[in-house]
Image (cartoon, grey):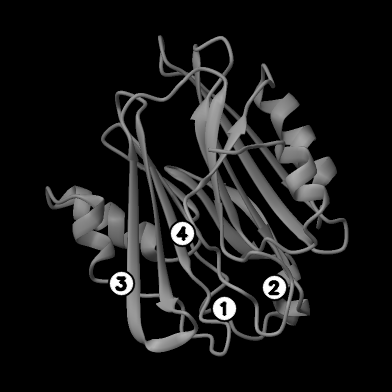
Amino acid sequence: MKIIDIAEALRTNAYPGRGIILGRSADNTKAVIAYFIMGRSVNSRNRIFTVTEDGIRTEAHDPSKMVDPSLIIYHPVRYYAGKTIVTNGDQTDTIWEAFKNGQCYRHALNTRTFEPDGPNYTPRISGVLKPNYSYNLSILKSFNGDPSQTCRYFWEYDAPVAGYGHFIHTYMQDGNPLPSFEGEPELLTIQSKTATEFADLLWANLNSENKVSLFVRYVDMATGETDDVIKNINE
């Protein structure tokens, strides 16, 4: 499988949309989570990440400019019973409720579909970092742009390798309509030793006109302690 350079992949793609990275630090001591959002419209760009008691949520930077919050205000990251959920929409809460009821993330996502924003039909991408620091990724997307069918794909990585991670994003590139992500999550190397270092790398290479917010977490697998970094274009 091709191994991408995440800096180059971001630098050469003006609009991957929203993206999730899950993986393992090179020294095999940290589990790695990253999530970013981008925006082309004023409404999408008018957002920040803020901290909640069990994760983060998106909020309007300027509430007076908010037009429609339905697909852009949500909890990207939530934590439940040792599991960290990261998604690009309100399916975070669907997965959280499933865990609370003793069900799995697949059960939760089988009740959901892609976003109702035709003609893009934005995919719903989701990840779960489990208590043993293995992880899952998923995408729910339309059938080649046809909204009459939902295609659900799940990948489970039960033995993450030190220094590697997987990257999934909503769009292949910019366009009208926006082309949905295709194929398996992309394999990348993770050489950054700290959350700050990785956040700086990602932030520097996301398109300067379209990037909105970024969250990076490094979890110490021996102690469970977390190191979080949030970057918002709207400070």
Tell whether 165 sits left or right of 63: left
Nearer the observer, 33 or 42: 33
Q: CA distance from mark 3 to mark 2?
A: 22 Å
- Which is closer to the viewer, label 4 or label 1? 4
Which residue is painted at 46% across and 78% down in the image?
Answer: 115
Q: Which mark is residue 83?
A: none
Which residue does the numbered mark 4 point to in the structure image?
125
**Cα separation between marks 2 and 4:** 17 Å
Q: What kind of residue is marked 2? A: Ser
The residue carrying pointer 3 sits among few (fewer than 14), some (14 to 19) or many (20 or more) residues within 10 Å by Cα, namely some
**Of callouts 2 and 4, the N-terminal one:** 2
Q: Residue at x 30, y 23 (%)?
A: 132
Residue furthest to the right in view is 208
Q: Amino acid at mark 3?
A: Arg
Foreground: disc 2 or disc 4: 4
Residue 43 horizontal/vertical position (percent): 71, 78
Mark 2–mark 1 Cα distance, whole angstroms, equals 9 Å
The Cα–Cα distance between marks 4 and 3, rounded to whole angstroms, is 11 Å
- To which residue does mark 3 refer? 112
Residue position marked by numbered label 1 in the rendering:
69
The reply to whether dot 3 and dot 2 touch (C-beta < 8 Å) is no
Residue at mark 4 to residue at mark 1: CA–CA distance = 19 Å
Q: Earlier in the sequence, mark 2 or mark 1?
A: 2
Q: Front-most of 71 and 141?
A: 141
Amino acid identity at mark 1: Pro
Q: Nearer the observer, disc 2 or disc 1?
A: 2
